Image: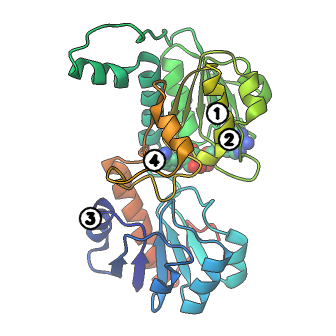
């Protein structure tokens, strides 16, 4: 089967080719799929996409015209695909529901530790032979209250790690988990959780309900000095409200592995050009903000799992078998 792989980097190519072993004809494009590039799909049976590809209604209609019957997402989130339109057009959509949730959870906890104890700033300083500790003070995690929004595969691991650090863990999720409650996690309504935490980490999907989960009113509820990490989806945080809270000096530190307008920026080397997004430039310039480039998933295990799962779905589709990982 002829498959167009969009947004592909050398590491994607290596992992997918190794899992493919010549079964399908994989054609790699560095471009993102969007209205301007959908013409590349002429003659392909399937498109393989990642987080920044845009499969909205216009793009999907063009996919259908080109004869594309399958969208294979190399990620868990499917907020970038218009699923109702895909269903109407008869385009099947598969995803990789889980690829090293440990990798993302460990990254999120690493981010909280870094923000609190300021490893990133210490690294910069000592390279300049500045061995002063001024401004590097953190706090013990043991005994502090951590909030986990979304206790699915990733959030559950984060909650258990934070419990092991000696934190009190408050969580919110429409589907509380008995195993986590038994381990000591206390579920709260989102509004109640906000005012009770010292650390906050986001692990819910981006949906119409979670869009701007953290907005002006939510920041107003937070205690002063909270350390916040978002490794989920940028749209969970209203960027202008985040900047306002930072300007007011009300947030302790913020880690963003995802950003509302990361498409076309994250995963790219823009070091030779001027970053046109002013809000992102301001965020990067704050000493108590750490921006990483949607890196949480990026482990050897995850790349292997993504490739194996994707090839499994391509095989199933090509052979007319049931698509176990279908979301449409
Ligand atoms: P999951 O589907 O296992 O868990 C998501 C949880 O969020 C579910 O328990 C769900 O009930 C809960 N949830 C839904 N709406 C909520 C709300 N309004 N408030 C609180 N909880 C809510 O997903 P998983 O695998 O844990 O991944 C979480 C998210 O992490 C993904 O949706 C994706 O956006 C992001 N992600 C980021 C990566 C990165 O590289 N930074 C890599 C992989 C995933």
Q: CA distance from mark 1 to mark 3?
A: 38 Å
Residue lying furthest front: 274
The residue identified by callout 1 is: 242
Estimate the spatial distance between the alpha carbons at disc 4 and disc 3, rounded to whole Å.
Answer: 19 Å
Query: Is 249 drawn above or below residue 175 in the view shown?
Result: above
Mark positioned earlier in the residue sequence (3 or 2): 3
Which element is circle 1 on?
Answer: helix
Say which residue appears at 59% left-offset and 68% top-offset: 326
Q: CA distance from mark 2 to mark 1?
A: 6 Å
The reply to whether discs 2 and 4 touch (Cβ–Cβ < 8 Å) is: no
Q: Is mark 2 within 8 Å of ligand 1?
A: no
User: Which quadrant contains ligand 1?
Assistant: top right
Ranked by sequence position, the earlier of labels 1 and 4 is: 1
Asked whether residue 66 is in view, the answer is yes
Instruction: Please state the horizontal and vertical placement of residue 192, each as a whole percent of the image.
Output: 78, 23
For the residue pair 36 and 62, the one nearer the viewer reads as: 36
Q: Are marks 2 and 1 in contact (CB under 8 Å)?
A: yes
> Which is more N-terminal, label 3 or label 1?
3
Whole-angstrom CA distance, mark 1 to mark 4, is 18 Å
């Amino acid at each position: 089967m002829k498959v167009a792989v969009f947004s592909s980097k050398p590491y994607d190519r290596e992992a997918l080719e190794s899992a493919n072993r010549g079964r399908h004809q994989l054609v790699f494009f560095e471009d993102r799929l969007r209205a301007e590039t959908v013409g590349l799909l002429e003659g392909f049976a399937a498109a393989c996409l990642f987080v920044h590809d845009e499969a909205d209604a216009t793009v999907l209609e063009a996919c259908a015209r080109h004869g594309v019957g399958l969208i294979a997402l190399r990620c868990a989130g499917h907020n970038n695909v218009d699923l109702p339109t895909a269903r109407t057009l008869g385009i099947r959509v598969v995803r990789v529901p889980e690829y090293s949730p440990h990798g993302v959870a460990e990254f999120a906890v690493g981010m909280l530790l870094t923000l609190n104890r300021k490893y990133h700033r210490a690294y910069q300083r000592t390279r300049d032979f500045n061995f002063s500790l001024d401004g590097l003070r953190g706090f013990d995690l043991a005994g502090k209250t951590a909030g986990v929004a979304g206790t699915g595969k990733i959030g559950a691991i984060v909650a258990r790690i934070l419990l092991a650090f000696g934190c009190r863990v408050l969580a919110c999720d429409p589907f509380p988990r008995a195993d986590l409650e038994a381990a000591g996690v206390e579920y709260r309504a989102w509004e109640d959780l906000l005012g009770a935490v010292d650390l906050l980490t986001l692990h819910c999907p981006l949906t119409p309900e979670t869009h701007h989960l953290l907005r002006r009113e939510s920041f107003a509820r937070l205690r002063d000095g909270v350390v916040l990490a978002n490794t989920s989806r940028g749209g969970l945080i209203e960027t202008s409200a985040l900047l306002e809270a930072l300007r007011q000096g009300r947030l302790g530190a913020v880690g963003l592995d995802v950003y509302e307008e990361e498409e076309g920026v994250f995963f790219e080397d823009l070091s030779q050009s001027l970053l046109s997004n002013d809000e992102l430039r301001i965020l990067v310039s704050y000493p108590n903000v750490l921006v990483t480039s949607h890196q949480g998933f990026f482990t050897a295990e995850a790349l292997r799992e993504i490739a194996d799962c994707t090839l499994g779905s391509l095989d199933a589709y090509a052979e007319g078998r049931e698509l176990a990982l279908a979301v449409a």
